[in-house]
Image: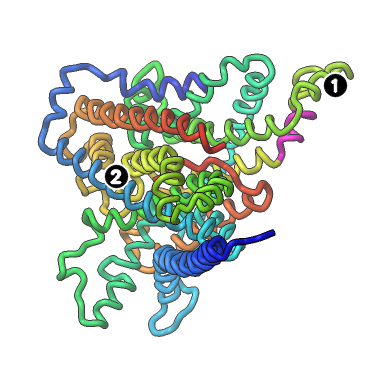
């Protein structure tokens, strides 16, 4: 079984011949990669910040205890609530027939006339955030717990303001975990396929959807190009996981 | 003890400011929490609302009735369930002995195994299926020729996808007990390896195995990408098709899918104080 897993994972590189590599410079491919990276960066940074704020609110911010476990459980569910059901949920919320779209219409605003579309960069970002934020909450909550009470007390006794405490102590300690998790988020939306496929029918220009088109062979059937695109994705993903593991080791220095 | 007025003043000011900070913190916490809750609940509420509207002018469960009456729903649902359970069993049979053996005899191999189990995170599903189709669509490894053999391949891939969760769950479980003493005790009572694994190690890992299995189930049950390109009639492709062809049923389907995920994750939380490392899923 491990052999099978190994072989199956090895397969893309089996086609890794340099002659198809040049085709990566094709305009469609470049655009697909650019869009994938743009969405992944946006959702990683936004998801990271919002997820961090939520984790802060339920752990340090002083909300009643039950809210914390509620949030943790819900994050576990929401981070796994992706793919087709998530796309469906958003179609009924922000699609042309969606409830929010209808509410805006009641207020006299036609969302789709203002240039908004669920099937665009902005729409996809909103949808991806639905699993990105919970992912951030799940990973960063334990890190926030690792902030020792003594550090804060020590800082206060030395006359530090809360801003100084966060800027000089808490954030530097947390930075490796925050960055590491954001890289994880980047990878998770970079490799996302099912959600975008269900939302756009596979016609949006994303790297994952491009590979899908190569498989089903509807558009520009060229297996070599598929290999090259796939390989490019693997390299980007491997690179992010590599940085993630370095940062992970870093964060263990203070947070155990 | 003599406290100078100045010190007292500083202390009072400090405590007053922390109290004020706490109130401000709590205020912002509520703002963030309510904002987050709205963001996450509105899509669910909207979907639920649509799922109740299938009959004109009345709210009711018509969409759910239609969904369950659909001739393709139950077959694809049950096929997905069978696939998921088979994958879980394959994964268990491979990961438990491996993790046990690594723990007991080959601790030096741990980084290697950890790296291998991380691979499904690194390789996006769509890349994985691309590679699989290229590899298994020609002799001698012709797997994609018939529906049945594709299905076997699909289940094996699902099992491989579950390795990271399974390994982590089992590894945590093994660390929580004294594997060496248990093994030696069993050995000195004359147990052989299969007895040790089946009657000593497995029962002690129940909680860990259950959470690994449920997590796998939640991820595999609605998996779209791999099943789609292998032309399998499972729940994921069915849901995608439904979204494109029907109006109200997809909302009911999404609610059902959410309920399944909720149930699986809820049980994990209940039994194990939920600390499974959920990094990747069928996105």
Residue B253 visible, this angle: yes
| Residue A106 left/right relative to B269 | left
Residue at image position (59%, 57%) is: A69
Secondary structure of the magenta portion, mostly?
A: helix
Quarter occupied by the C terminus of chain A: top right
Question: In the rendering, which numbered label is found on residue B53?
Answer: none
Residue B148 visible, this angle: no
In the orientation shown, which residue stands out farthest toward the right?
B189
In the orientation shown, which residue stands out farthest toward the left?
A27
| Residue B95 left/right relative to B128 | right
Where disc 1 sits, the SS reads helix
**The magenta stretch spans which residues?**
B198-206
Marks 2 and 1 belong to one chain: no
Chain hosting mark 1: B
Camera-nearest residue between A154 and B158: A154
User: Within the magenta stretch, is there residue B204?
Assistant: yes
The residue at which mark 1 appears reads as: B185
Please tell me whether residue B36 is drawn above or below residue B164 in the rendered image.
below
Are there few (<14), some (14-19), or many (20+) residues within 10 Å of tag 1? few
Chain hosting mark 2: A
The residue at which mark 2 appears reads as: A40
Return the x and y of residue A136 as percentages of the image width and height.
Answer: 44, 48
Return the x and y of residue B259 as percentages of the image width and height.
Answer: 53, 60
Residue at image position (42%, 32%) is: A247
């Amino acid at each position: 079984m491990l052999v099978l897993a190994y072989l199956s994972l090895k397969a893309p590189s089996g086609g890794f011949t340099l002659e198809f590599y040049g085709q990566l410079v094709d305009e469609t491919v470049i655009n697909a990669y650019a869009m994938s990276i743009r969405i992944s960066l946006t959702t990683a940074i936004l998801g990271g910040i919002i997820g961090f704020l939520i984790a802060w609110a339920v752990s340090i911010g002083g909300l009643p205890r039950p809210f914390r476990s509620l949030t943790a459980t819900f994050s576990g569910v929401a981070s796994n609530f992706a793919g087709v059901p998530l796309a469906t949920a958003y179609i009924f919320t922000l699609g042309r027939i969606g409830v929010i779209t209808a509410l805006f219409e009641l207020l006299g605003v036609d969302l789709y006339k203002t240039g908004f579309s669920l099937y665009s960069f902005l729409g996809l970002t909103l949808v991806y955030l639905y699993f990105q934020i919970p992912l951030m909450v799940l990973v960063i909550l334990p890190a926030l717990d690792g902030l020792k009470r003594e550090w804060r007390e020590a800082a206060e006794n030395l006359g530090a303001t809360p801003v100084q405490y966060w800027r000089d102590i808490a954030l530097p300690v947390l930075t490796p975990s925050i960055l590491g998790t954001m890289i994880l988020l980047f990878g998770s939306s970079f490799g996302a396929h099912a959600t975008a496929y269900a939302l756009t029918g596979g016609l949006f220009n994303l790297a994952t959807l491009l590979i899908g088109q190569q498989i089903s062979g509807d558009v520009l059937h060229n297996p070599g190009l598929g290999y090259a695109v796939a390989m490019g994705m693997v390299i980007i993903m491997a690179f992010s996981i590599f940085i993630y593991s370095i940062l992970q080791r870093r964060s263990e220095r203070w947070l155990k | 003890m003599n406290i100078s007025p100045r010190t007292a003043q500083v202390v009072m000011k400090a405590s007053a400011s922390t109290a004020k900070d706490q109130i401000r913190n709590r205020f912002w916490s509520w703002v963030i929490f309510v904002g987050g809750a709205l963001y996450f609940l509105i899509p669910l509420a909207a979907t639920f609302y649509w799922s109740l509207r299938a009959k004109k002018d009345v709210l009711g469960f018509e969409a759910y009735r239609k969904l369950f009456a659909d001739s393709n729903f139950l077959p694809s649902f049950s096929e997905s369930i069978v696939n998921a359970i088979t994958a879980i069993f394959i994964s268990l049979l491979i990961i438990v002995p491996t993790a046990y053996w690594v723990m007991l005899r080959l601790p030096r191999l741990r980084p290697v195994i950890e790296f291998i189990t991380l691979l499904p995170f690194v390789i996006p599903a769509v890349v994985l299926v691309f590679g699989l189709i290229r590899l298994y669509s020609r002799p001698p490894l012709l797997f994609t020729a018939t529906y049945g053999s594709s299905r076997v391949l699909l289940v094996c891939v699902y099992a491989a996808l579950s390795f990271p969760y399974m390994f982590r769950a089992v590894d945590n479980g093994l660390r929580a007990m004294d594997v060496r003493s248990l093994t030696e005790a069993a050995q000195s009572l004359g147990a052989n390896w299969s007895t040790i694994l089946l009657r000593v190690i497995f029962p002690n890992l129940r909680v860990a195995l259950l959470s690994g299995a449920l997590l796998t189930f939640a991820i595999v049950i609605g998996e779209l990408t791999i099943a789609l390109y292998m032309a399998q009639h499972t729940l994921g492709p069915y849901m995608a098709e439904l979204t494109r062809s029907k109006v109200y049923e997809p909302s009911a389907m999404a609610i059902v899918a959410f309920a399944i995920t909720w149930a699986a994750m809820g049980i994990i939380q209940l039994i194990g104080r939920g600390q499974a490392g959920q990094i990747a899923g069928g996105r």
